[in-house]
Every structure is written in C-alpha cells, then in structure tokens.
C-alpha cells in the first residue's frame, strides 16, 4: 500500500470530518434509503428485476482469474461487467475477449501481452515474496503493471546514507530501501522514480512518498541531522511539519504542490494500464455480455482473377437462439450482421452490413426453430493476411454476438503451381439460370452452393442418414501437354472412417476433358450416405496432374448422427 506522512493523513482526515459535518442529515438518510432500495432490487440490461448474484458461488477458476491473475490490469468497468455475468460460458467468452483486446499482434496465434503478463507474475512471485506472494507486494504489482525498471538503486542492508540536498542533505543511516527508475511510463511521465522501503527489515518493501521514512535515526535525538539542523537553522523536533517530507525543510525550501503531484502520480502507478488495442470496444459492454448470441462462421477461398480471390463468408445462426415477435399470425425475427476486414496494419479494406429478416407462419414455428438460418457475403480480396471482425445482433431480443478471426487469403497463381480452392461440403448444390450467374446469395459462377457450416467448437459438420453429401471445389493451373495440346488429370474421391482409417468409398475418374480456360477445373460430386454408420468420416479429393506430375488433396470431415 502507498504510505503517506502523518501530517497528510491528519490533514485529509480533518477535511473528511469538515465535509461530513456539512452534509444535511436528511440527505444522508435519503442516500442510505436509495442504497438500500438498490440492494433489494436490481435490474438486468433489459430492465427486468433479478436477484443479485452470489459471487461466492462463482467457479473457483473464474474467481481466481479475476481476483488474482488480472487484479492489477483489469479496469473497473471490466471488473464490474465480469461480476455481473450469469454463467461460465459468458465468463469464458469475456476472458477470451479481455486478452484479445490487449493483443498487440491479433493476426498471430501468440498473444504477447498475455504471455508477458504471466511471465511478470511468475517473476514477481519468485523475487518479491515477503510473507505473501510476491505478486501481491508493492514491488510485485509495479513490476506486473510496468515491467522491469530501467535501473534500480538498491540498498538491501540499509546503513550509512548521504541524503540528496533536496531531501535536506546530511548523513544518516537507513532501513533497507530501493529506488526504481523508469525513463518513461505512458500516462504518467518521464524519468519516474519509485521508492520502496523495508522498515521492518523483513523484506516487506512498500511504496513510500516520504523520503524520510527510510531514515532509521529519525527518532534518535541529535543523530542523522539534516544540513539545516546541523547549522542550527532548524530543529529535529520540527520534522513532520513539512507535508509529506518528514526529513524537514531543505536549504532549497519545500514545494507543497509537488508533494500532492506525487500523491496523484503514485495513485496512477498502481492503476490498471490503459487498453491500447480497442478495435472491438463493445466486447466489454455489459449488455452484450449478458446477451450473448452464438453463431458459427465459415470462410472459403476461390480464384476470382489473376490478382484477386473471391472470399465467401458464411454466417450461421440457430433459429432457436432468436427472439420472435408475433404479428398477424406470423412470427417475425430479425438479425443484423456487420462485418469488417482489415489488414495487419489496421487499414480497413472491406465492410458489409445487412439485415436478415425471417418471417414464419405461427403453425410452422416449432419446426422452424429446430433449423438454422444462413447469410453469406462474398468479397474480392488480394492474397495476404487479414483480420475479420463480425458482429451479429438479434434485433428483437437485443442479444449480441461477436467474433474475431485471422484469415490468410491464398495466392492461387503461386508461380503456376497446381492449387485448389476450399473443399466445400454443401447441403444445396444446383445450377442457376443464366441471368443469375455470378450474383445472388450462395451463387458461385453458374452454381448455387450453400455450404454446411461447422460449429465454432471445432467439431465437424453434422449430417443425418438420408442427407446428401455434396462436394464442390475448383482446381487451378492444370498443365497442358505440349504434344496433345490438352490437359491430363485424374480425380479420386476417398471417404474413410476417421476412427479406424478404413475406406468406405473410393472412386477415380478422368477429368482432363472438363478442364476449362487457364487450366481451371470445377468439381461437383453428389452421393448418398445412407450406407454409412453413425460416426466421424473424412472425405479427400485427390487431384493428380499427369502432365506436371503435381497433386493436391484437400479434405474435410463430417459426422453422421
């Protein structure tokens, strides 16, 4: 804790008493009544009363994360939001978003901020413990928040000490103390010095604003005098009358305003550091955290031109998670979808925002809520790495869901090497009228291909017996035989049981005659899964270019329930 001088404490206590005596009794009573009423009835973000959550019943891991792991870096707003969450899923999602907001390189798997934070905690526990974990001491907390100082003036045994002139000068003896110096701390200033003193000699260093607190001779008459005291210009008995500085006045005088600046600075030193990476500020919004809307996303890649790819982004929402409003015998649900793609440097390259309106006859609602609704936006993008941010809102219910995903758009030219688009498992695959070619929802060239979207937990897409397994993909850069002037390629479709790697389907066909301009090939395959037993399977499409002797073999998993 931050130590202050006795004079300052007396001064502050006096102010508190004066202010307290000036408050009318009626106002205090009204305030107390309001506080009591607020404790009795609370409201959720939708304005509905609910019982206050017993924090003692929160899962141990979540409680430890809040009260130990991130105690020094979580903002008051974030802590308040976290404590109001109602279940483990919401708290897990909050924690994920908490670290993501602080990730300096969100387009990589590593979160350097998170790794550095836990490294600092481990270092603090190892080096600054003193009857308590080092991460809970003043030195440990400063180290966790601000990192290692640029220099340390350490006096682990105390002993003889020459005071600086601004602290009164003169020779004395001290308790163990350290002065940490930082060249710069964002939001606080440059050349920041933090003094810690161990007055008990037990290793329990604490921050002090009083340069005289480390003086071991402060209570010994006639010992450890300052320059003014040794010159007869002041008395040691006058110490403590100079604000925060109990060494007494220096030859240069004292500046009380500087002392109060020190109080403010030291309060900032132990405050949570500012969040620098706020691309999705709404991830800490209390309302959203109370009203999470789950959804799944699929991102596919196919070649659009020599310089760009077409990137279909498919969003899937379970109908049962939406809120319906009845009107004229029809149940209405509405979903707003917002998406944004940015480069690694933060430049916005694409945005989209669309409503998805669902109107269901009342008698069909029960069947409808057992299905899902899909939305797709196909964007042209150049090869490279991007950040995809998505926000999905249930308009009627106010529920909100967000997702961040790093995507790597491939270069299908790749010096002319054989390459392939994403292998799409589709629940619908059919040709479209010529007038609709290349436009409309789920339309890729002359086909409507509606993909099956795997769940966010990483499980494969799920099929029921009787469903059709539709495969769609494209192959690029097939070579042409110089003698015949034609390509030569084979396509093999394999399906294996993922549990035992046993083949359940294998078919090979010659695809050379289907190759189009530029050596491209579109593959469309439909077959029944009726003969397959429940379980998980992997389908692979092996394309072998017999001219260039190159192969690609994209694969995908699916499960039969």
Image (cartoon, rainbow, N blue to C red):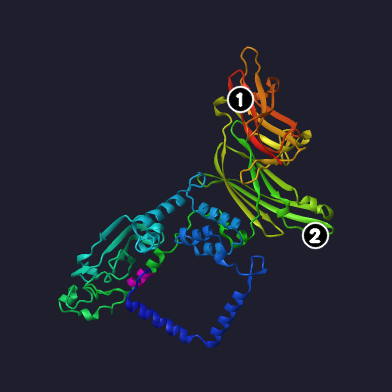
Compared to residue 327, the image places residue 254 above or below, namely below
Residue 37 image-quadrant placement: bottom right
In the rendered structure, the answer to whether residue 431 lies left or right of residue 419 reads right
At x 58%, y 64%, the residue is 84
Furthest residue in direction front, as rendered:
500
* Residue in the foreground of this view, choosing between 519 and 103: 103
Indicate whether residue 259 is drawn in magenta.
yes
| Start-end of magenta stretch | 258-263
Between marks 2 and 1, how big is the CA–CA gap?
53 Å
Residue 422 seen in this snapshot? no
At x 64%, y 65%, the residue is 45
At x 50%, y 85%, the residue is 23
Compared to residue 208, the image places residue 302 above or below, namely above
Name the residue beneath numbered marker 1.
477
* Residue in the foreground of this view, choosing between 455 and 477: 455
Q: Position of residue 90 (x, y in %)?
A: 60, 57
**Which of the two labelled residues, at mark 2 and mark 1, occupies the earlier sequence position?**
2
Main SS class of the magenta portion in the image: helix
Label 2 sits on a secondary structure element that is strand
Name the residue beneath numbered marker 2.
326
Q: Position of residue 371 (x, y in %)?
A: 75, 48
Indicate whether residue 153 is drawn in magenta.
no
Label 1 sits on a secondary structure element that is loop
């Amino acid at each position: 804790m931050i130590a202050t001088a006795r004079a300052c404490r007396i001064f502050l206590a006096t102010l508190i008493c004066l202010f307290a005596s000036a408050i009318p009794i009626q106002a205090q009573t009204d305030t107390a009544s309001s506080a009591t009423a607020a404790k009795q009835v609370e409201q959720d973000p939708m304005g509905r009363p609910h019982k206050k959550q017993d924090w003692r019943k929160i899962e141990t891991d979540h409680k430890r994360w809040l009260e130990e792991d991130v105690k020094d870096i979580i903002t008051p707003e974030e802590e308040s939001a976290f404590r109001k969450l109602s279940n483990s899923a919401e708290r897990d999602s909050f924690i994920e978003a908490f670290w993501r907001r602080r990730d300096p390189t969100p387009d990589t798997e590593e979160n350097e901020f998170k790794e550095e934070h836990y490294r600092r905690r481990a270092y603090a526990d190892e080096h600054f413990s003193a009857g308590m974990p080092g991460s809970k001491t003043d030195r440990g907390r400063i180290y966790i928040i601000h990192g290692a100082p640029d220099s340390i003036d350490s006096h682990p045994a105390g002993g003889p000490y020459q005071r600086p002139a601004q602290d009164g000068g003169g020779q004395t003896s001290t308790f163990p103390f350290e002065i940490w110096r930082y060249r710069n701390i964002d939001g606080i200033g440059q050349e920041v010095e933090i003094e810690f003193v161990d007055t008990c000699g037990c290793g329990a260093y604490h921050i002090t604003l009083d340069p005289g607190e480390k003086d071991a001779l402060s209570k010994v008459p006639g010992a450890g005098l300052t320059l003014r005291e040794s010159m007869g210009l002041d008395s040691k008995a006058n110490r403590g009358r100079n604000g925060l500085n109990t060494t007494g006045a220096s030859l240069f005088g004292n500046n009380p305003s500087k002392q109060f600046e020190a109080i403010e600075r030291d309060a900032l030193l132990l405050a949570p550091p500012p969040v620098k990476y706020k691309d999705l500020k709404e991830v800490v919004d209390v309302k959203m955290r109370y009203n999470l809307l789950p959804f799944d996303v699929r991102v596919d890649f196919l070649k659009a031109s020599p310089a760009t790819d077409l990137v279909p982004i498919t969003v899937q929402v379970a109908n049962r998670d939406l809120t319906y409003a009845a009107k004229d015998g029809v149940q209405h649900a509405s979903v707003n979808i917002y998406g944004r793609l940015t480069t690694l440097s933060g430049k916005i390259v694409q945005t989209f925002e669309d409503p998805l309106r669902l109107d269901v006859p009342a008698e069909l609602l029960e069947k409808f809520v057992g299905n899902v609704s899909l939305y797709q936006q196909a964007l042209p993008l150049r090869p490279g790495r991007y950040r995809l941010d998505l926000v999905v809102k249930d308009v009627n219910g106010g529920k909100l869901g967000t997702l961040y995903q790093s995507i790597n758009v491939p270069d299908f030219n790749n010096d002319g090497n054989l390459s392939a688009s994403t292998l799409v498992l589709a629940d619908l695959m059919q040709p479209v009228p010529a007038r609709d070619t290349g436009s409309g929802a789920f339309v890729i060239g002359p086909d409507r291909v509606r993909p099956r979207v795997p769940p966010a937990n990483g499980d494969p897409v799920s099929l029921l017996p009787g469903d059709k397994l539709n495969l769609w993909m494209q192959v690029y850069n097939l070579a042409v035989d110089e003698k015949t002037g034609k390509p030569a390629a084979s396509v093999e479709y394999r399906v294996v049981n993922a549990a035992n790697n046993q083949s359940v389907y294998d078919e090979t066909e010659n695809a050379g005659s289907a190759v189009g301009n530029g050596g491209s090939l579109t593959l469309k395959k439909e077959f029944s899964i009726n003969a397959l037993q429940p379980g998980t399977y992997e389908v692979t499409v092996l394309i072998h270019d017999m001219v260039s002797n190159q192969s690609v073999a994209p694969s995908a998993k699916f499960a039969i329930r």
